[in-house]
Amino acid sequence: MDLKLEVAIVPVSDVGRAKDFYKRLGFREDIDYDSGKGFRVVQLTPPGSPCSIIFGKGITSAQPGSIDRLVLAVHDIAAARDELLSHGVAVSEVFHDVGGGLGGGFYAGTEARAPGPDPQGRSYASYASFTDPDGNGWLLQEIKERLPGRGVTMDVAALARLLHETSEHHGSFEAVAPPHDWWDWYAAYMDARERGSNPEEASAAAGRYMAEVKHVVSRA
């Protein structure tokens, strides 16, 4: 039986301020429901993540700022840090384990942190940290290659539905495009859908990918 972690609760003191902060990071807004009776739930999802965060009013008794290091996996720690800085987020310098291990971001204090990325460039070994306006902690961890068995699992039924949808939308592109490898369009469309785009936006994104990367331009 699968047990999929899909939501983490983040305690905040000011819902509007928290929402603005996380949207500035590029988190996708999924839900903002306010009952008008002291209950509000906001759900946001980090780019490319299967797990969302929820905060609001009347949803947790945890103290604002009590979260210690939710982890965001990134492919390029320097690029991710630069992007967050460009959005006005105060991010620490990149660091690694002073002893040469892989756990430098998970020690309770900062004494085990050595400045700079992991000298060997290993996955799981380079980190950077930041906090939200309430002090909830986040940790960036660079993962270029996952350990065996640590790939993303798939829901077969959901994947089948997405493939069916993709095939339907690909038909309109195929009708006006020169010969091309259908799997390139499929991959771009599915990636856009997984990132939160609606079908029309995903079709446009796939078309741009084919034109800009594969140099396949439709006649539409």
Image (tube, rainbow, N blue to C red):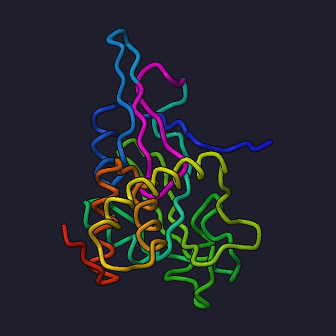
Residue at 34 percent across and 31 percent down: it is 15
Could you say where residue 57 lies in the image, as x and y percent from the top left?
41, 22
Location of residue 182 by image quarter: bottom left
User: In the image, which residues are magenta?
Assistant: 41-60
Residue 163 as seen in the image, left or right of residue 89: right
User: Looking at this rendering, what residue extends furthest in the bottom direction?
Assistant: 120
Could you say where residue 54 lies in the image, as x and y percent from the top left?
47, 35
Q: Please, is residue 219 above or below residue 16 in the view?
A: below
Could you say where residue 84 lies in the image, as x and y percent from the top left?
33, 64
Nearest to the observer: residue 128 or residue 170: 170
Residue 115 as seen in the image, left or right of residue 209: right
Quadrant of the frame with the C terminus: bottom left
Residue at 54 percent across and 73 percent down: it is 142
User: Looking at this rendering, what residue extends furthest in the top direction?
Assistant: 37
Residue 13 as seen in the image, left or right of residue 212: right
Residue at 39 percent across and 50 percent down: it is 196
User: Looking at this rendering, what residue extends furthest in the front direction?
Assistant: 175
Could you say where residue 125 lies in the image, as x and y percent from the top left?
62, 76
Q: Would you say residue 59 sits in the magenta stretch?
A: yes
Nearest to the observer: residue 175 or residue 162: 175
Q: Would you say residue 58 sits in the magenta stretch?
A: yes
Location of residue 5 by image quarter: top right
Residue at 67 percent across and 44 percent down: it is 4
Nearest to the observer: residue 152 or residue 104: 152
In this rendering, the count of numbered labels is 0
Quadrant of the frame with the N terminus: top right
Q: Please, is residue 75 above or below residue 116 in the view?
A: above
User: Looking at this rendering, what residue extends furthest in the left direction?
Assistant: 220
